[in-house]
Every structure is written in C-alpha cells, then in structure tokens.
Image (cartoon, helix red, strand yellow):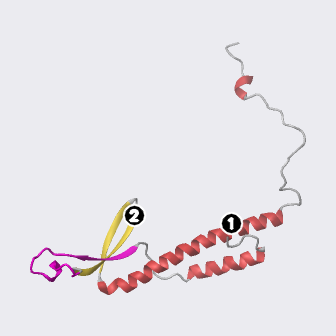
Amino acid sequence: MAGAGKSVAALERRWAEVRAALSAVEELRPGALVNRYRRCGKATCHCALPEDPGHGPYWSLTRVVGGKTVTKVIPAAAVDRTQRQIAEHRRFRDMVRELVEVGEHLCEARLSDAAPAGAAEKGGSQRPSRRRPSARSRRSSGPA
C-alpha cells in the first residue's frame, strides 16, 4: 500500500505530487483499440486465398457505456492519437486510485495524531449499560 506507515508530512507531499500530476492530464478516452481484417467473399479477390489475412486493418474503439458495448470506427490516421488517449486514460485512473489511497492514509494518520493517548483502545466503560424500554411498551395498551 502506498502510504501505510508513512509520516503525515510524507503523505502530504505525495498528495500534492499526485494532485499536480492530475492537473497536467492530456486528452483521454476509455476503451480498447482493436484492429480487424475481413474477407469480402469474392472468389477472385486476394482475400479468398488461405494465407491472405484479408482486407484491413480496420480499427475500432470498443468500450462499455451504461452496461452496453459501444464500438466506434477509428480512421487509420487517428490510430496513434487514439492509442495515446487510451494510455492517458489508464494513467489518469491509476492517479485517481493513488490519490484516494493516499488521502485515506493521510486522514488515518491525522486521526491518529489528533486522538488522545489510549482513546483508540477497546473496552469502554466498566459499568454495563441497562436496556431502556421502548416508547411503544411505555404507551398504554388501550383507551383509558
């Protein structure tokens, strides 16, 4: 875990570093880029030969939106840019995950620093509590 056992100052430094990195995020998009080849079905075409991969590559971006898979065709000229956008999205997700983790450790470290000695120990009071009757059982059970 990034942050477990670190000092508050070290966690604050890492918090600031991750936040600064998040402010420098470039264009991003989620999904996976795949290339596909297809056969046209014409007997005289080169794609009909067994060793030929077929026509293509055709590039498409696939991702899930609202529980459904959505596919978008990507022109060959935009493949490099799309790959960079996907990589940036992965980097962004990793940074957000780390920010949450560091934030959680920082909050815990600050709580530990703020708590008086022995306050976090279990045991509570020595006297057992008495159960009070509920409001329903205190009501009269009919018209008076």
Would you identify the image quadrant in which residue 108 lies? bottom right
Question: Which residues make up the magenta segment?
Answer: 32-52
**Is residue 35 highlighted in magenta?**
yes
Q: Nearer the viewer, residue 122 or 114?
A: 122
Depth check: give the residue in front, 114 or 71: 71
| Coordinates of residue 39 in the picture (x, y in percent) | 19, 75
Please tell me how crowded label 1 is: few (under 14), some (14-19), or many (20+) other residues with Cα within 10 Å: some
Per the image, the residue denoted by label 2 is 65
Task: Tell me the amino acid under the disc marked 2.
Answer: Val
Question: What is the spatial separation of the Cα atoms under label 2 and label 1, in whole angstroms?
Answer: 29 Å
Secondary structure found at label 1: helix
Residue 13, image x and y in percent? 71, 80
Above or below — where is 84 with respect to 106?
A: below
Tell me which numbered mark, 2 or 1, is placed earlier along the sequence: 2
Residue type, numbered disc 1: Glu
Classify mark 2: helix, strand or loop: strand
In the depicted view, which residue is nearer to us: 129 or 38? 38
